[in-house]
């Protein structure tokens, strides 16, 4: 007996089919459904499976094994609403290709439930198996999730019962795969585990092996949206006291090939009392005490944000969470990137790159890295009607971390992963004019009115990415690759400056399909400065915008949308005016790098002062801030991870003017022009350095240095540029 059934799940919420069983045997039902499903076989519930929009798969695959007699049964299916993205995505997060993509998704997933039925001789276990793409790496093998519903009442026990209690015990279920027989991990329930179900992990590879790649690195993406695809199947043996059956279990592509950390390891949570001894200690004037209070509050927040996902999560270990309240199940790429720029300053005591290890562990075949990962399964989280790669900042951050620690071995390991990510973006996000397109979710600006074709943010980020890869290649000794990356950076810079500069408003802006540029002035217009892509004559225009009180220089400077833009919200409105520390960091660091250092310091200090005022009032480091007064943003989470980048990294790098290069045991210092600033216990590679600067009656500056190991110090003031080799011990230098 072989029968194929197809229910039109889109047309009905309930469907039935009479199944006539001609003889006793083992009935197999292979079920593929793109709607939430409840399936009954007679009075027995076979499956109760959801396809919630956050579970990253639009289609479920199940196989039910049912011992049956020669009789008729009604197969009854109930269907739920199809999984889709949340309404705010269409309402607030623009994309140039969404309408066409949604048509293709509708064609690929039309709302059907397909059931292939076969009857075999003999008997077997009574179970329903759900095959999912969640995986873990353990003991040198890849293990894949299997959710099992044990079905009662289909067949009698075929063994002698000793007493009534024995009769009430279900037959023991045993599973093994062809990859490694008799290996099985039973796990705690997960978001896809329904009531009455058990969750297991079984090996799908042998020791030291990996699954085949689903796509080549840098290939054109042929999927409609993120999701793990089957790359083969594994012979699975399912047995209990009633009998045994073999099932072909799909093996899904495994993510994180080559990741620095693959298998779960416990990382002790960082404690502030230990971190405090390992971080730089800023020396600030007494009037700046609120900034110092906020600096240490940021470190306490980072310690409080440490999360332990558990060994069955698919994550390689602990990570920095997104917020103390909210986003408990999520890890974002660009949130993690900016948070790590701050956490890297505690590299001697804080597992600052463990969060990056988690990101690499979910990098997909082809190089794609999804913006938002589910820390319960290490799968892409949330359906999105586009692929959504967050701003690709990981190379920038890896390089910054290496320049603090001097760890070049780490760069060797992550370089291939970063080049694969670059290749995916170049193939799938580059326009014919050489600029790059993105979406309101991908670029992280959610409801920003920045819709268009080529985006200054991603285009500048790709040039910065290429520059960082060039520097990494040079550090690890691949000079030819370094030169190639520099050429790539130059090509992206040329496209940016040719196509994304708005002559009318004298600012970088998203290009439009019919020519011209988006009229809204978005804070990411300053991103090309951080990547050092802006011709000198245009730097002045951007400085003017940044310092204009009618535009970006509001009470709290550098709103995400300029005050003279059409869609500006004076309350913040999330990305329609709120102040965000990551974009402020990028803009201010850009002004600093371009040579507009006085403007950079002016804006940095005002930004930090406004943050400190809110921190003094509320005791909280907010996700974003109001542009018109010292208050939290109108839509903002408490104690948000990336907010630490300003009170930590911006304070040290712009206000105090410290630029590390531990790879070459070198430190550049542009002292604050006033009195009473410096730093103690600055961790530059193996060196621990303390610095202080003061002005002398003769107009010169006096730098006082204490270090336990020799290093090269470059001191730059308005009056003088000095470079010296500082010996271990105490030194004084007049500059």
Image (cartoon, rainbow, N blue to C red):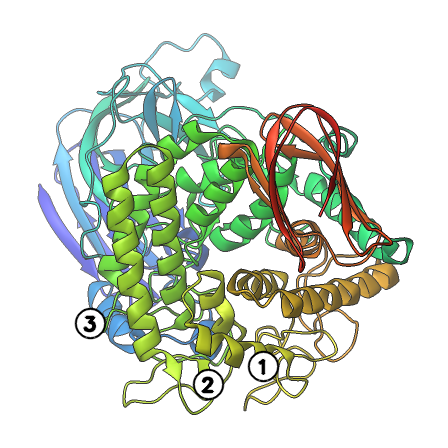
Sequence-wise, the earlier of marks 3 and 2 is 3
* Residue positioned most to the right: 286
Residue 544: assigned label: 1
Locate residue 113 relative to residue 587 in the image: left or right: left
Identity of the residue drawn at 53% across and 78% down:
540
Residues at circles 1 and 2 in contact by the CB criterion of under 8 Å: yes
Residue 154 or residue 603, whichever sits in front:
603
Give x and y (percent) for residue 509: 42, 80
Q: CA distance from mark 1 to mark 3?
A: 32 Å
Q: Which residue is mark 2?
A: 506
* Residue positioned most to the front: 698
Give x and y (percent) for residue 708: 69, 23
Give x and y (percent) for residue 75: 27, 52
Give x and y (percent) for residue 113: 24, 57
Instruction: Using the image, determine if residue 528 lies above or below residue 515.
Output: above
Which is more foreground, mark 1 or mark 3?
1
Residue 577: assigned label: none
Q: Which residue is mark 3?
A: 432
Per the image, label 1 sits on a secondary structure element best described as helix
**So how many labels did they put on this image?**
3
Neighbour tally class for label 1: few under 14, some 14-19, many 20 plus, Cα within 10 Å: some
Locate residue 70 relative to residue 193 in the image: left or right: left
Sequence-wise, the earlier of marks 1 and 3 is 3
Instruction: Using the image, determine if residue 524 lies above or below residue 731.
Output: below
Residues at circles 1 and 3 in contact by the CB criterion of under 8 Å: no
């Amino acid at each position: 007996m072989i029968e194929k059934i197809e229910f039109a799940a889109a047309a009905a919420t309930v469907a039935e089919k009479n199944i006539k069983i001609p003889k006793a045997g083992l009935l197999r039902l292979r079920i593929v459904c793109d709607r939430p499903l409840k399936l009954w076989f007679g009075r027995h519930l076979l499956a109760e499976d959801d396809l919630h929009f956050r579970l990253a798969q639009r289609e479920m695959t199940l196989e039910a094994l049912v011992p049956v007699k020669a009789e008729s049964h009604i197969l009854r299916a109930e269907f739920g609403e199809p999984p889709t993205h949340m309404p705010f995505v269409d309402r607030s997060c623009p994309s140039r290709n969404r309408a066409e993509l949604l048509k293709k998704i509708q064609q690929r997933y039309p709302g059907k439930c397909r059931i292939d039925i076969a009857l075999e001789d003999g008997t077997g276990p009574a179970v329903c198996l759900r095959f999912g793409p969640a995986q873990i790496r353990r003991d040198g093998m890849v293990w894949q999730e299997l959710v099992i519903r044990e079905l009662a009442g289909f067949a009698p026990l075929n063994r002698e019962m000793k007493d009534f209690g024995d009769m009430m015990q279900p037959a023991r279920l045993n599973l093994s795969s062809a990859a490694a027989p008799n290996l099985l991990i039973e796990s705690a329930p997960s978001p896809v585990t329904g009531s009455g179900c058990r969750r297991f992990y079984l090996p799908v590879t042998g020791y030291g092996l990996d699954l085949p790649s689903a796509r080549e690195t840098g290939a054109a993406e042929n999927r409609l949206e993120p999701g793990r695809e089957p790359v083969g199947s594994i012979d699975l043996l399912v047995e209990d006291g009633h009998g045994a059956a073999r099932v072909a279990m799909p093996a899904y592509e495994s993510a994180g090939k080559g990741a620095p950390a693959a298998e779960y390891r416990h990382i002790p949570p960082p404690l502030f009392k230990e971190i405090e001894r390992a971080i730089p200690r800023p020396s600030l004037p007494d009037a700046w005490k609120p900034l110092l209070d906020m600096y240490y509050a940021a470190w306490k927040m980072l310690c409080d944000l440490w999360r332990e996902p558990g060994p069955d999560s698919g994550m390689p270990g602990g990570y920095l969470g997104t917020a103390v309240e909210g986003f408990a199940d999520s890890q974002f790429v660009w949130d993690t990137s900016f948070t790590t720029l701050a956490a890297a300053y505690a590299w001697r005591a804080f597992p600052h790159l463990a969060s990056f290890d988690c990101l690499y562990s979910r990098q997909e075949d082809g190089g794609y890295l999804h913006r938002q990962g589910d820390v319960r399964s290490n799968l892409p989280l949330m359906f999105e009607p586009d692929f959504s790669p967050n701003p690709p900042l990981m190379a920038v951050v890896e390089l910054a971390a290496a320049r603090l620690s001097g760890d070049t071995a780490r760069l060797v390991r992550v370089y291939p992963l970063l080049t694969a990510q670059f290749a995916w973006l170049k193939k799938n996000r580059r326009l014919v004019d050489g600029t790059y397109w993105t979406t309101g979710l991908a670029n992280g600006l959610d409801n920003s009115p920045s819709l268009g074709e080529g985006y200054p943010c991603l285009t500048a980020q790709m040039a910065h990415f290429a520059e960082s890869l060039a520097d990494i290649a040079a550090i690890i000794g691949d000079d030819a690759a370094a030169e190639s990356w520099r050429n790539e950076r130059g090509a992206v810079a040329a496209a940016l400056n040719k196509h994304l500069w708005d002559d009318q408003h004298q600012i970088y802006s998203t290009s439009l399909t019919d020519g011209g540029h988006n009229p809204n002035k978005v804070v990411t217009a300053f991103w090309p400065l951080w990547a050092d892509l802006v011709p000198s004559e245009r730097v002045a225009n951007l400085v003017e915008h940044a310092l204009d009180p009618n535009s970006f220089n509001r009470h709290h400077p550098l709103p995400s949308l300029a005050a003279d833009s059409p869609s500006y919200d004076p309350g913040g409105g999330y990305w329609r005016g709120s102040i965000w520390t990551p974009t402020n960091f990028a803009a201010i660091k850009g002004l600093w790098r371009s040579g507009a250092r006085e403007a950079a310091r002016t804006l940095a200090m005002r930004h930090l002062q406004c943050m400190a005022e809110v921190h003094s009032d509320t005791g909280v480091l907010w996700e974003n801030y109001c542009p018109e007064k010292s208050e939290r943003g109108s839509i903002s989470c408490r104690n948000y991870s990336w907010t630490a980048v300003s009170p930590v990294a911006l304070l040290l790098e712009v206000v105090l003017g410290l630029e590390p290069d531990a790879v070459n045991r070198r430190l550049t210092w542009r002292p604050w022009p006033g009195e009473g600033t410096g730093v103690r216990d600055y961790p530059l590679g193996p060196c621990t350095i303390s610095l202080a600067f003061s002005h002398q009656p003769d107009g010169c500056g006096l730098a006082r240095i204490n270090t336990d190991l020799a290093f090269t110090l470059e001191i730059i003031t308005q009056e003088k540029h000095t470079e010296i080799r500082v010996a271990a011990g105490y030194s004084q230098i007049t500059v």
